[in-house]
């Protein structure tokens, strides 16, 4: 399932679309396929080669928001890009594995503070090395160092996972 999400996000990013609200509630099964929905706060980059867009406000669901989406720069801009969606993908993986997003015990400003100031979320013990590696690369705090979807697609966790076509068997 994660492979399908990663492939779908990669396709959006190649078209210059940043979703900005990747979370489990924004995925549905339709026609035997996993689909990303709710593009209400998504943005299209005027130039697909751009790396970030700037917003004046924070938008999204705090427990899935990347540090850069929460913390404004000196100009008061919240600069988000492909790396923000990758962070949210990592948070989604944690929820799929544990039934809770990172920092779920906290709400509002407290949750935002935890995203900014706490170490990057980790999986509890018991998950494969490959899954841990994938999640850790998604949840690297610095967006410049965070793996892109192209890098993630080369990890064993994705390369060895069944493709999105395997979801057709879930009907």
Image: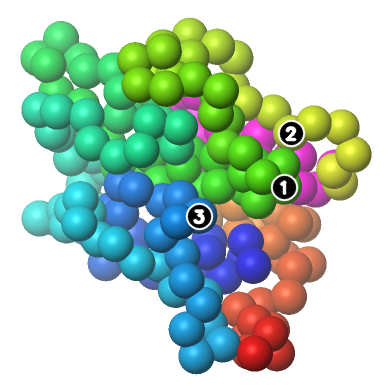
Asked which secondary structure carries label 1, the reply is helix
Asked which secondary structure carries label 2, the reply is loop
The range drawn in magenta is: 129-147
Q: Is residue 33 magenta?
A: no
User: Which mark sits nearer the N-terminus, 1 or 3?
Assistant: 3
Q: Nearer the viewer, residue 6 or 94?
A: 94
Badge 2: few (under 14), some or many (20 or more) residues near its Cα, within 10 Å? some
Q: Is residue 67 left or right of residue 141?
A: left
Q: Nearer the viewer, residue 160 or 115?
A: 115
Which residue is identified by label 3?
Answer: 24
Q: Are marks 1 and 2 in contact (CB under 8 Å)?
A: yes
Looking at the rendered image, the disc whose residue lies closer to the viewer, 2 or 3, is 3
Task: Point out residue 135 in the picture as x, y percentages from the top left corner.
Answer: 65, 41
Which residue is identified by label 1?
Answer: 97
| Rendered image quadrant of residue 36 | bottom left
Q: Nearer the viewer, residue 36 or 49?
A: 36
Task: Point out residue 123 in the picture as x, y percentages from the top left corner.
Answer: 74, 33
Asked which secondary structure carries label 3, the reply is helix
User: Could one spot residue 90 in this view of the protein?
Assistant: no
Which residue is drawn at the image coordinates 64% and 82% (left, top)? Answer: 167
Q: Are marks 2 and 3 in contact (CB under 8 Å)?
A: no
User: Which mark sits nearer the N-terminus, 2 or 3?
Assistant: 3
Task: Point out residue 63 in the picture as x, y percentages from the top left corner.
Answer: 45, 32
């Amino acid at each position: 399932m994660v492979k399908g999400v990663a492939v779908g996000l990669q396709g959006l990013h190649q078209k210059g679309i940043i979703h900005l609200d990747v979370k489990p509630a924004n995925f549905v099964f339709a026609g035997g396929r996993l689909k990303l929905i709710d593009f209400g706060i998504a943005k299209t980059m005027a130039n697909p080669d751009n790396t970030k867009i700037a917003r004046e406000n924070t938008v999204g669901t705090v427990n899935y928001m990347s540090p850069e989406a929460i913390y404004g720069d000196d100009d008061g801009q919240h600069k988000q890009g492909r790396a923000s969606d990758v962070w949210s993908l990592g948070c989604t993986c944690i929820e799929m594995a544990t039934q809770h997003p990172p920092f779920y015990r906290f709400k509002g400003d407290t949750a935002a503070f935890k995203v900014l100031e706490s170490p990057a979320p980790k999986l509890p013990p018991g998950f494969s090395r490959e899954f841990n590696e994938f999640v850790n690369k998604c949840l690297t705090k610095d967006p410049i160092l965070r793996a892109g979807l192209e890098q993630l697609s080369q990890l064993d966790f994705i390369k060895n996972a069944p493709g999105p076509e395997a979801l057709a068997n879930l009907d």
